[in-house]
Image (cartoon, rainbow, N blue to C red):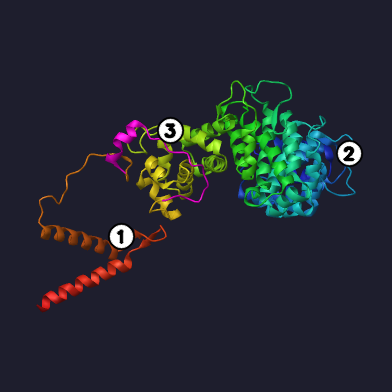
Amino acid sequence: MKMDLNAIIETVQTGDQDAALTALQAYNKEKCQCFTFDSDEREERQRLGELVMAFLERDLQPSCQLACLETIRILSRDKSCLGPFSSREAIQTLSRHAGIEHSEASVTPELPDVDVIVEALKCLCNIVFNSPAGQEVGAQLRLIVGLTERIKLCNDRHWTHEVRFFDLRLTFLFTALRVDVRGQLAHELRGVSLLADALDSTLGLRWLDTFEVARADGADAALPLPRQETERAMEILKILFNITFDANRRDVDEEEAALYRHLGAILRHCLMSKADGDDRTEEFHSHTVNLLGNLPLMCLDVLLMPKVQQASIEYMGVNMDAVNMLLDFMERRLDRGHKPKETLTPSLNLLTESARVHRETRKFLRTRVLPPLRDVKNRPEVGNALRNKLVRLMTHIDTDVKHCAAEFLFVLCKESVSRFVKYTGYGNAAGLLAARGLMGGGRGHGRYSEDEDTDTEEYREAKPNINPVTGRVEEKLPNPMEGMTEEQKEFEAMKLVNMFDKLSRDQVIQPMRVGTDGKLESMEEDMSRIGQQRSSSNSDSDVD
């Protein structure tokens, strides 16, 4: 039977702690899985929220505190009833129960009730997520300072997994939704260093060398990470992503570079680790890849620094395990095909930039993605090889996706137009070449070594018969003008010009040509001049 909200309100209004506890516990049990609310009882829920917040100010037993906080957590799911929980007084009360109130006068109890702390943190997470007003108050109260103080104590066994997890979740929400808090954590509170240490501690690492880590417990890297540690590590990765989003777009000094390399070494370990189950591993690696994409390019060399081991993938004397893992991750995302802009472009961009700045990485990726060309009978986009899949992406409907795929292959071709066209076909390559002003051929602006592109015997034999537009061998078609007189050829040519002219005037197409800068430019003036000349010629004929 549905509970009567008014009866609960009346019970709480009496001020009797035992009666209120019984009523709120019954309400919480009924509504614990409720995430949508009837508009009919909005005013009653608002009133109940006000009463429970006021009740929480009293000196209550932990069980009653917990019941009040559970009720607040349930009610704060309703975006239309956040008023009682978004005020300065409400946020202060909740942050005090969560043990993160930033105030000289605030004193955390010597033996805090962990269940109360967790429930208060859950309430704050809901309020910050759903209420801009709550976000504003939380930022003004500098709750991020209290949170970071406790995050520093991540090794303190007094704090349970849930306390540490929701500390991180609330920190993530603040940094995702408030630019000022993001900057405060990154700079004033030295967030990158603090969170790198927290990640190190959470994963239980030991340092083998300056930029090489392993599990401190000596466990085999093939064994999955514990579930709770993985959950906390992913929250840390998400916070770090928020506060480093501009790191690769600005100059960093030596101290920052050393810090980012230190973080990069930990991220390499994350990339090479497994979580509990394939889906959780995929999620863990996804957050790792996203964060690696924020690191300054000069710091990505830590991916290649570990010594080559017996089971390592070696190329040119360099350990390519991490690069190979990135490539496999990217291909899995590519095969899945779900939301490629969100799921695929981060790994594609990371591989592209790594290949651009590290010669060994580029050459290794080229052996995997663009091996010597043998199949010249099929179009470059046909087939199940990684090259075929990426070429198909070059004509994707999403501009960002097709640009990322094209840029990756272009960099693997050392930004050589002829090599790029050889592997992709001119038709697929045209978009990138037009954007770069390279329609007439040449090279991009990247600096690369001068090693030669070795053609296979199959390619050399077929090369004269390859159609550069489609990128495959095609039978020569008969000349449609064979056997025509010059007058017939001229008539067909003018017929074609007239058709193009009509399509252009009807704005179905816009005739273009390659300009002196290598980019496409309109032929509208040329078409207009040809039209005028034709009109003048016809007028002269009429006079005759």
Mark 2 Cα shell of 10 Å, populated few (<14), some (14-19), many (≥20)? few
Q: In the rendered view, would you say 19 is above or below 439?
A: above
Q: Are circles 2 and 1 on residues that touch, CB within 8 Å?
A: no
> Answer yes or no: do the residues labelled 3 and 2 have beta carbons within 8 Å?
no
Q: Which residue is at a point 39% across and 40% down the rendered structure image? A: 423
Q: Which residue is mark 2?
A: 109
**Residue 453 position by quadrant:** top left
Q: Which residue is mark 3?
A: 371
Q: Which kind of residue does numbered mark 1 sit on?
A: Val
Mark 3 surroundings: few (<14), some (14-19) or many (≥20) residues within 10 A: few
Q: Which dot, 3 or 1, sits closer to the camera?
A: 3
Within 10 Å of the Cα at label 1, are there few (<14), some (14-19), or many (20+) other Cα atoms? few
Mark 1 or mark 3, which is nearer the start of the sequence? 3
Relative to 322, 261 lies left or right: right
For the question of whether residue 12 can be seen, the reply is: yes
Tell me what residue is drawn at x 46 percent, y 35 percent: 369
Of 307 and 93, nearer the camera is: 307
Secondary structure beneath dot 3 equals loop
**Residue drawn at point x = 44 percent, y = 54 percent:** 435
Q: Quadrant of residue 502?
A: bottom left
Out of 223 and 13, give the one closest to the viewer. 223
Residue 1 x/y as whole percent: 64, 36
- Dot 3 amino acid type: Pro
Question: At numbered mark 2, what does the secondary structure look like: helix, strand or loop?
Answer: loop
What label sits on residue 508 in the rendered view? 1
Q: Secondary structure at mark 1?
A: loop
Earlier in the chain: of badge 2 and badge 1, it is 2
Viewer-closest of 494 and 20: 494
Single out the mark in the foreground, 2 or 1: 1
The residue at the point 83 percent across, 31 percent down is 158
Membership of 387 in magenta stretch: no
Q: Which residues are magenta?
A: 442-467
